[in-house]
Image (cartoon, helix red, strand yellow):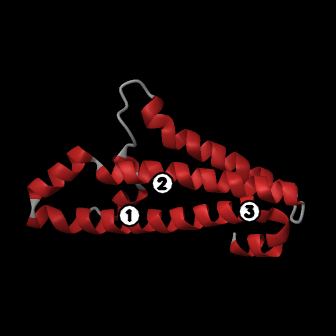
């Protein structure tokens, strides 16, 4: 993504720069929260079981991941539109980025759109697969 932006930085303008920064920062936040969630959920049950129950009830990681996922999709949407308008790279890649952003935003909002859904389902996190004690 960085290379794609740098190749046509002048052509994409402010929209491309904003999309690149938003996508870059939300990726860093997602990785940070995923690692923290994975480490906390692996280490805390033995030390403080009530803290794990409270975290699950408050679902703070789910909220952070949900908002971050929407911002991530918005960043890719902005970047894809900027690449499409700049015409420096093949437009098919920009179309793929925009369609992936829209699909990602839809699936990020799916738990909220489903009747009875209160927010992002933290059990769907891919990090959970690595936190199961062996």
Q: Residue at x 28, y 48 (%)?
A: 59
Q: In the current view of this chain or complex, which residue is farthest to the top?
A: 115
Q: Do labels 1 and 2 touch, CB within 8 Å?
A: yes
Where residue 93 sits in the image (x, y, percent)? 79, 58
C-alpha distance separating marks 1 and 2:
10 Å
Q: Residue at x 44, y 48 (%)?
A: 66
Q: In the current view of this chain or complex, which residue is farthest to the right?
A: 87
Q: Is residue 59 visible?
A: yes
Compare marks 2 and 3 and give the one earlier in the sequence: 3
Task: Classify the position of the C terminus by image quarter.
Answer: bottom left
Compare marks 1 and 3 and give the one earlier in the sequence: 3
Label 1 SS: helix
Where residue 110 sits in the image (x, y, percent)? 49, 36
Q: Residue at x 61, y 66 (%)?
A: 21
Q: How many marks?
A: 3
Specify the label residue 68 is tagged with. Answer: 2
Specify the label residue 33 is tagged with. Answer: 1
Label 3 SS: helix
C-alpha distance separating marks 2 and 3:
21 Å
Which residue bears the numbered disc 3?
A: 14
Q: Is residue 133 visible?
A: no
Q: In the current view of this chain or complex, which residue is farthest to the front?
A: 14
Is residue 57 depicted above or below 114 in this figure? Answer: below
Q: Residue at x 11, y 65 (%)?
A: 46
Compare marks 1 and 2 and give the one earlier in the sequence: 1
Would residue 127 appear left or right of 45 to someone viewing this image?
right
Task: Classify the position of the N terminus by image quarter.
Answer: bottom right
Task: Give the label, 1 or 3, closer to the camera.
Answer: 3
Where residue 8 sits in the image (x, y, percent)? 83, 70
């Amino acid at each position: 993504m960085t290379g794609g932006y740098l190749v046509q930085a002048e052509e994409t303008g402010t929209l491309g720069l904003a999309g690149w920064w938003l996508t870059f920062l939300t990726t860093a936040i997602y990785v940070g929260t995923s690692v923290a969630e994975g480490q906390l959920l692996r280490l805390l049950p033995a030390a403080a079981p009530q803290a794990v129950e409270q975290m699950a009830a408050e679902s703070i990681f789910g909220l952070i991941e949900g908002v971050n996922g929407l911002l991530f999709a918005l960043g890719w949407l902005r970047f894809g539109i900027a690449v499409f308008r700049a015409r420096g790279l093949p437009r098919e890649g920009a179309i793929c980025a925009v369609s992936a952003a829209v699909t990602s935003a839809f699936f990020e909002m799916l738990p909220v759109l489903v009747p009875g859904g209160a927010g992002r389902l933290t059990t769907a996190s891919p990090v959970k697969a690595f936190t199961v004690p062996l």
